[in-house]
Image: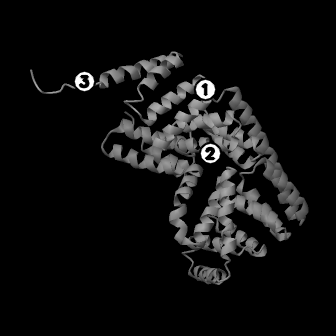
Amino acid sequence: MTSDYYIKDNADIEGQKLNAAKGLYQGGDYRGALRLYLDMLNSDYTYKLCYEIGRCYYKLNDFDNAEQYFTRSVKMENIKNPSFMFLGNICHKKNNISKAIEYWITSYSYKPDDETVCLNLASSYFSKDMKFYALYFYEKYLKYAKDKTSDSYLETKNSITEFITIGNDFYRKALRAIDADDNATAIQALEYAVKNIPTNFDINSLLGELYYKEKMYPDALKYLKQAYCLDSKSNDILKKLYSTMVQTGNISGSFCCIKRMLPLVIGNQKEYLEIIKTSKDIQLKLDKAYCAKHIELAKKYYDNNNYHLALFEYENYVLLDNNLSYEYDDIIQKIKSFLHPEERIIKTCFEKGSFYRSGKDYIKSNKYFSKIMTLSDENSSDYKLAKSRIVNV
């Protein structure tokens, strides 16, 4: 006899249940898999288990319970969690398109080369008549689709090609009209062009400029903002935005444009000092009550899934009062992850790929450099550098 207590380790039993549940799921027995997963909850309450339970309920068309467990999963782990994709699907089935987009774009933020997510986002934005985002994600879908021969791919490609061809035809017509000093015809042509290619920087910029010349400032602001969303480092666009906001009496908006110009002209001392002086003059005229409107606009844009303009207004609010940066930094970083996931992932892949390459683990390093080549444009320096670091093994 001994006083020791012998406690049975149930890790093997739980492992057997997990493997059995996975086998049942893969075999299409979702109820059987669900019973085993639910039985494991008391000993293994993790985000992965909640995700698996959610998947079983989803396959059984019990979307309320599926949503409950997917939500539990993302509360425990909100980075790289596949539950976001399913939550988007469920919201879409319930006709909550805006919420579906928010979930899907969260999924896109860590896996931008997921063709299904890109197509879902494109279709949903199209249904909301938000053509800028619709075209943006249709183009992403065409880039990342694995089957370039499917009906879905070919139909999308033909439609996008047609839109681009029509848009460029109207753009050339606008340029000819400008040469003939016929701004009215140019504006009309550019309006048709931008409807077909809303993601074209040159078209948006030129249309905004022409509306400004015609003193149609609200219209100018619309397209100059869209051009800024496409290239936030364009000092020329910021100057045009600043002038337009001055004309519309938007003091806080013009101040934010000036602040954004500063890092872009740091190499030009004269221009830098002029901007500093102008920003100080404007700051004296700022109306705090009007400044608060920026946060209202930011929330409105976010709720409507217009993440570029939501970011623009959140950043405006922080530019107006830097003390608020801590309060809005999380939402700003979240939106940035929505809009530029490839940049962040490419940077991480270069770091990890270089680390494994230096240790001569070429299989792992090739994995990261190949990922960069998938996410970047073939003509980009990132693509060329990653390709040069691939080692034949």
Examine the rendered structure and indicate whether residue 189 appears above or below residue 84: below
Residue in the foreground of this view, choosing between 173 and 149:
149
Element under disc 1: loop
For the point 66% across and 81% down, the residue is: 282
Residue that mark 2 sits on: 102
For the point 49% across and 37% down, the residue is: 73
- The amino acid type of the residue labelled 2 equals Glu
> Mark 2 and mark 1 in contact (Cβ < 8 Å)?
no
Residue that mark 1 sits on: 62
For the point 70% across and 29% down, the residue is: 152
Element under disc 3: loop
Q: Could you give the CA–CA distance between mark 3 and mark 2, rounded to whole angstroms?
A: 45 Å
Among the two numbered marks 3 and 2 on one chain, the one whose residue lies closer to the N terminus: 3
In this rendering, position of residue 58 left or right of residue 244: left
Dot 1: few (<14), some (14–19), or many (≥20) neighbours within 10 Å?
Answer: few
Count of picture labels: 3
Question: x, y percentage for residue 83?
Answer: 53, 36
Q: Could you give the CA–CA distance between mark 1 and mark 2, rounded to whole angstroms?
A: 22 Å
Among the two numbered marks 3 and 1 on one chain, the one whose residue lies closer to the N terminus: 3
Examine the rendered structure and indicate whether residue 172 appears above or below residue 233: above
Dot 3: few (<14), some (14–19), or many (≥20) neighbours within 10 Å?
Answer: few
In which quadrant of the rendered view does residue 219 lie? bottom right
Question: x, y percentage for residue 87?
Answer: 59, 37
In this rendering, position of residue 211 left or right of residue 147: right
Residue in the foreground of this view, choosing between 12 and 358:
12
Q: Which numbered tag is attached to residue 8?
A: 3
- The amino acid type of the residue labelled 1 equals Asp
